Amino acid sequence: MGKRKKNPRVSEENLGDEDEEMNENKGATEKSSSSSDNDLYQVLGVERTASQQEIKKAYHKLALRLHPDKNPNDEEAKEKFQNLQKVISILGDEEKRAVYDQTGCLDDADLASDTIQNLRTFFRALYKQISEADIEEFEANYRGSDSEKKDLFELYVKCKGNMERLFCCMICSDPVLDSHRFKDMIDEAISAGELKQTKGYEKWAKKVSKTKPPTSPLRQRKKSNSSSSSSDLYAIIAQRQTERKGKIDSMFSSLVQKYGGDEAVPEPSEEEFEATRRKLEKRRSKKK
């Protein structure tokens, strides 16, 4: 009997997968080749709010598909791959990406360092540099405002009445200055049915009620002078070191009085020390 020839059989599922991958590669190559006409984020298949990590991940995935070595029969593979490199050179660079987001420009000349420098100047003119005086002004306008009240209620719901956690999240807040003030606002909202009282808040409110409220709760918080605070810290450390040294000295003095007598034991002279050393060496040599 003759041997039956085995015909290679390809399943329809495998054929479908290959067709799907070929279509994806074709679509990707078409996107990269026409990157100047399409949105660069659409070329990579990511959102405009995508992070740098997401952009690089999408790029590497496309680069593996579009690499000329994987597409030897495609005469335009090299050009398509170069276009993909241009896409990542723009979106992978924070400064060039900012220029593209603002202007939609794709030309290398427009993405040069001079343009980027001009963009920095533009953004600096549009958004002025925040100074310490600006922060103080914002804090003065924010504390006691409707915006603060709205944020307070939202954080109360989010933190489920945990006021310690709320103070960690609330901007321009100080537990010493604002505890009574926040308590009054929250109590009023609970009475009006706008907020629900929790066990954690009830416990905190009782604790606050036992303390004395500040005379001027809306005053600005005092700034700590770094130089004075550091010098005070050094003084406290030095004082504690002196106290500890005194306690140790007194402890040793009491031990000497208790176990060593009133007379201090004199230190041995060099001659006595040398004589003792010789005696020890003789004893060791005899034992050997």
Image (spheres, rainbow, N blue to C red):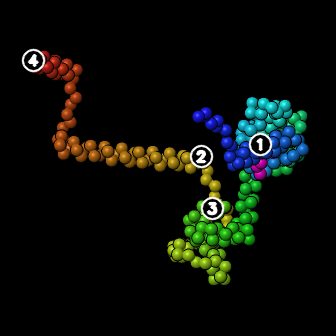
Position of residue 2 in the picture relative to residue 269 (left or right) = right
Instruction: Determine whether, in the image, residue 65 is placed left or right of residue 187.
Output: right
Magenta stretch, residue numbers = 43-47
Quarter of the image with the C terminus in it? top left
The kind of residue tagged 2 is Ser
How far separated are the C-alphas under marks 4 and 3?
79 Å
Q: Is residue 247 left or right of residue 78?
A: left
Q: Looking at the picture, which amino acid does disc 3 mark?
A: Cys
The answer to which of 274 and 162 lies nearer the viewer is 162
| Residue sitting nearer the eye, 24 or 194 | 24
Question: Which label belongs to residue 22?
Answer: 1
Q: Distance between the residues labelled 2 and 1?
A: 68 Å
Q: Which amino acid does label 1 sit on?
A: Met
Q: Which mark is residue 286?
A: 4
Disc 2 is placed on an element classified as helix
Tell me which numbered mark, 4 or 3, is placed earlier along the sequence: 3
Question: Is any atom of residue 142 visible in this view?
Answer: yes
14 sits to left or right of 183: right
Q: Name the residue under label 2.
A: 227
Pointer 3: what residue? 169
Q: Do the CB atoms of the residues marked 1 and 3 lie less than 8 Å apart?
A: no
Residue at 73%, 65% (x, y): give it: 142
Label 4 crowd bin: few (<14), some (14–19), many (20+), radius 10 Å: few
Q: How crowded is mark 3: few (under 14 residues within 10 Å), some or many (20 or more)?
A: some
State how far apart marks 1 and 3 are (Cα).
51 Å
Q: Is residue 283 above or below residue 240?
A: above
Q: Measure the alpha-carbon separation of dots 3 and 2.
A: 28 Å
> Any magenta on residue 286?
no
Q: Which of marks 3 and 2 is in front?
A: 3
Q: In which quarter of the image is residue 37?
A: top right
Q: Which residue is drawn at 22% across and 44% down?
A: 255
Q: Which residue is drawn at 87% across and 35% down?
A: 108
